Image (tube, helix red, strand yellow):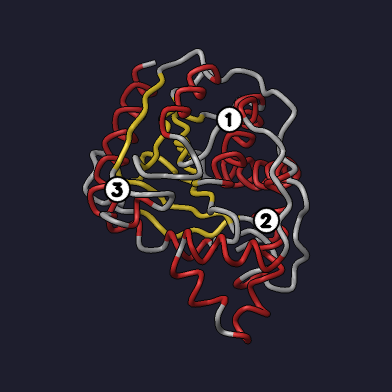
Amino acid sequence: MSGRREWLRDYGATGPCPGVRMVCFPHAGGNASAYAAWRNGLAGGAEDVELVAVRYPAREDRLLDPPVPSLRAMARMVAADLENLHAEAPLPLVLFGHSMGGSIAHEVAVLLRGAGLPVALLLVSARLPVAALTPGRHQSDAELAATLCDMDPGTGEVLNDPELRELVWPAIRADHDATNRYHGHRLPRLDIPIVALGGHGDDRVDPKALSFWRECTDAEFRISLFEGGHFYYRDDLERFLSIVSTHVSGAIAAFSRG
């Protein structure tokens, strides 16, 4: 991967002739590698999909890169890499972001549309738009660790291992601090469809409040809800990716017509 695209990891395409590039933005503390398995689940859609995941610093193969303390700064860097990639291999874009990643994906969508790039769809998961956010309460390391263990048992297993915790904690702490600071501004309305996704049982993001995303676009808006909590999509990933594929195929078909 070239230095110009240090924020992106390419997981290849679901077929020989991709018609769309889907870019996935992880949650706070999350990793690009979590999306590696998604390619197979997206393979049944009407369009071949090139799958790209965002590589945040301070983890995995960017472990030595310092964290970026601002979601908006991260968005600018990702957008720059996507512009470079698009110049080399143009494809319509679909952006998917979960939790913190939803905010970064939204910021990137605004930047890319402002630069004239073909973004066909924004998928935001378990996250409210910035206009609906308020400052997050700072938690001590112990409080944050307890919250994460309760929300995601897999994270609990990692944090209970002293060696693994030492590796992953700087990224987790930095991401959550940056997320708490992300509020107090408005973004221009988009001209692309938005689909807001969430879990009926999410105790961090009220699924009814996902309707706030309607104010972020002049194009089509939909809400798609699933059983489960904040990480609802893990409960039935196959079904989730099938529904996402349907949204992607519909957006690309509309984009091609328009």
Q: Which residue is mark 1?
A: 129
Q: Which residue is mark 2?
A: 175
Do we see residue 191 in this rendering? yes
* SS for dot 2: helix
Q: Nearer the N terminus, badge 3 or badge 1?
A: 1
Dividing the picture into quadrants, the one containing residue 19 is top left
Q: Nearer the N terminus, badge 2 or badge 3?
A: 2
Q: Is residue 163 above or below residue 86?
A: below
Dividing the picture into quadrants, the one containing residue 238 is bottom left
**Residue 150 tag number:** none
Q: Is residue 142 above or below residue 35?
A: below
Q: Is residue 31 left or right of residue 77?
A: left
Closer to us: 146 or 249: 146
State the separation of the CA atoms marked 2 and 3. 26 Å
The amino acid type found where label 1 is placed reads Pro
Q: Is residue 186 left or right of residue 32?
A: right
